């Protein structure tokens, strides 16, 4: 199981590294191609749009053909799309490459996470998912560094190298023992969408992806306008991801023992506070510091969301591959709306309004997950350890 955990961590690392690599490059692309904040937001959202398109097909493929097959296919697509990004010459080919990268990510995430859940003991599932998410955060940590390297050494060489890394991971996955395919029952999908734990998990994937999408557009553009370069902007995201790497396995262990309610409510309170802080900040060091805290508080919602999804799927007999496909759809919906919406709002009425909207969403979610009587809140916040 340890070898598979390392492999899955590496798969999600490459996915998120590609997504985050655009952050320090975004101001340069905006200058080169004359992109407004809306256009920059659409470029960031292109990756998530690809995930949204491929989410459910990717989950079905992981269930029907086995998680290993889906993961390998996703890595091959990512490798090809990375080479396409390396040789893109305008905003349209850049955007198309990002969409295809997202399609590959939908396959590899659904396959990799379903593969891990298939072999992990139920009582350690939260820890395993939290560790895999830590791998994704390492990718988010390395992504801005990769973008900074590309800004200095050249986009072609850097992203061809990333494509080669994805191909090597596909070869490694082929040499690893797979997990059996699972039947795809449409009735189970319908039942999952009526299961409160599952729906709560979907929301806890959509919300942080939307919030992180807002950060991915507004923070680098604001810091660039305040005089910071690509390497410095990459360092901001590097610092935030470094903190998250250690936090998520700990959150996973806490969920296994105590449930998800406490971590979720704490993360939401911090998210409200930091969103308001970003709306008011006007100096580059303050924006950078708040961006680090925001990345940690927003990202802390993801492991609880994954645990609720996995538990809800078990309760209604939904295959884990399809469950993680729906998870990808929720993440992609948030990360399509977040960057494009933040860019549009920023152009029309200013960044403070976009951050204010983020704070309002977090406050509303806090109300929904806070118990108002002896029972649970509107969204259930407990993952029992018994079947």
Image: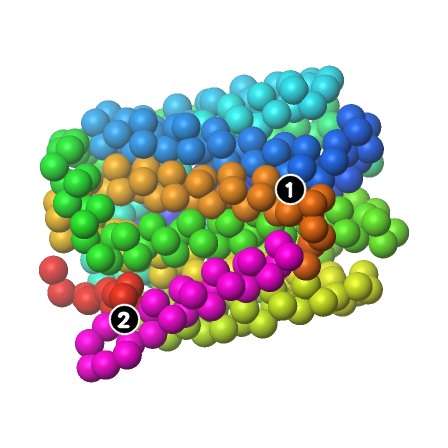
Q: Are marks 1 and 2 in contact (CB under 8 Å)?
A: no
Q: Name which quarter of the figure residue 3 lies in.
A: top left
Compared to 125, does 37 lie above or below? above
Q: Quadrant of the C terminus?
A: bottom left
Q: Which mark is residue 301?
A: none
User: What crowding class fits label 1: few (fewer than 14 Cα within 10 Å), some (14-19), or many (20 or more)?
Assistant: many
Q: Nearer the viewer, residue 223 or 365?
A: 365
Q: Which residue position is annotated with label 1?
A: 344
Residue 213 forms part of the magenta stretch: no
Q: Which residue position is annotated with label 2?
A: 377
Between the residue at mark 1 and the residue at mark 2, the CA separation in whole angstroms equals 34 Å
Residue 360 forms part of the magenta stretch: yes
Q: Nearer the viewer, residue 328 or 174?
A: 328
Q: Residue at x 34, y 74 (%)?
A: 370
Q: Is residue 23 left or right of residue 267?
A: right
- Secondary element type, mark 1: helix
Q: Name which quarter of the figure residue 277 lies in.
A: bottom right
Q: Position of residue 241 (x, y in %)?
A: 59, 57
Q: Residue at x 22, y 57 (%)?
A: 196
Residue at the extreme front of the image, as rendered:
349
Compared to 316, does 182 lie above or below? above
Q: Is residue 222 left or right of residue 116?
A: right
Q: Residue at x 39, y 44 (%)?
A: 330
- Secondary element type, mark 2: loop
Q: Nearer the viewer, residue 311 or 32?
A: 32
Residue at the extreme right of the image, as rendered:
227
């Amino acid at each position: 199981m340890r070898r598979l955990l390392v492999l899955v961590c590496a798969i999600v690392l490459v996915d998120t590294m590609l997504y985050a690599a655009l952050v320090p490059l975004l101001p340069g692309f905006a200058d080169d191609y004359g992109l407004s904040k809306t256009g920059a937001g659409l470029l960031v959202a292109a990756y998530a749009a690809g995930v949204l398109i491929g989410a459910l097909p990717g989950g079905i493929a992981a269930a029907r053909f086995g998680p290993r097959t889906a993961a390998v296919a996703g890595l091959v697509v990512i490798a090809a799309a990375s080479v396409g990004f390396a040789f893109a010459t305008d905003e349209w080919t850049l955007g198309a490459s990002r969409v295809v990268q997202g399609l590959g990510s939908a396959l590899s995430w659904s396959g990799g996470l379903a593969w891990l859940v298939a072999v992990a003991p139920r009582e350690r599932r939260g820890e395993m998912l939290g560790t895999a998410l830590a791998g994704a955060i390492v990718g988010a940590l390395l992504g801005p560094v990769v973008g900074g390297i590309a800004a200095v050494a050249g986009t072609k060489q850097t992203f061809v190298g990333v494509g080669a890394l994805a191909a090597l991971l596909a070869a490694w996955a082929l040499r690893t023992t797979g997990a059996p395919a699972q039947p795809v029952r449409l009735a189970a999908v319908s039942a999952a969408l009526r299961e409160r734990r599952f729906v709560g998990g979907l929301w806890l994937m959509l919300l942080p992806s939307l919030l992180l999408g807002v950060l991915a557009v507004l923070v680098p553009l604001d810091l660039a306008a305040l005089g910071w370069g690509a390497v410095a902007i990459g360092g901001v995201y590097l610092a935030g991801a470094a903190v998250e790497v250690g936090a998520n396995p700990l959150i996973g262990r806490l969920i296994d023992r105590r449930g998800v309610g406490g971590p979720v409510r704490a993360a939401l309170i911090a998210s409200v506070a930091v969103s308001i802080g970003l709306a008011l900040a006007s100096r580059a060091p303050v924006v950078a510091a708040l961006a680090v805290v925001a990345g940690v508080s927003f990202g802390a919602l993801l492991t609880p969301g994954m645990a609720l999804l996995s538990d809800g799927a078990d309760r209604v007999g939904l295959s884990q591959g399809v469950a993680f496909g729906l998870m990808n759809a929720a993440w992609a919906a948030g990360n399509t709306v977040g960057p494009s919406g933040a860019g549009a709002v920023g152009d029309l009425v200013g960044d403070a309004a976009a951050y204010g909207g983020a704070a309002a969403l977090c406050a509303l979610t806090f109300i929904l997950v806070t118990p108002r009587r002896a029972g649970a809140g509107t969204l259930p916040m407990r993952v029992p350890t018994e079947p």
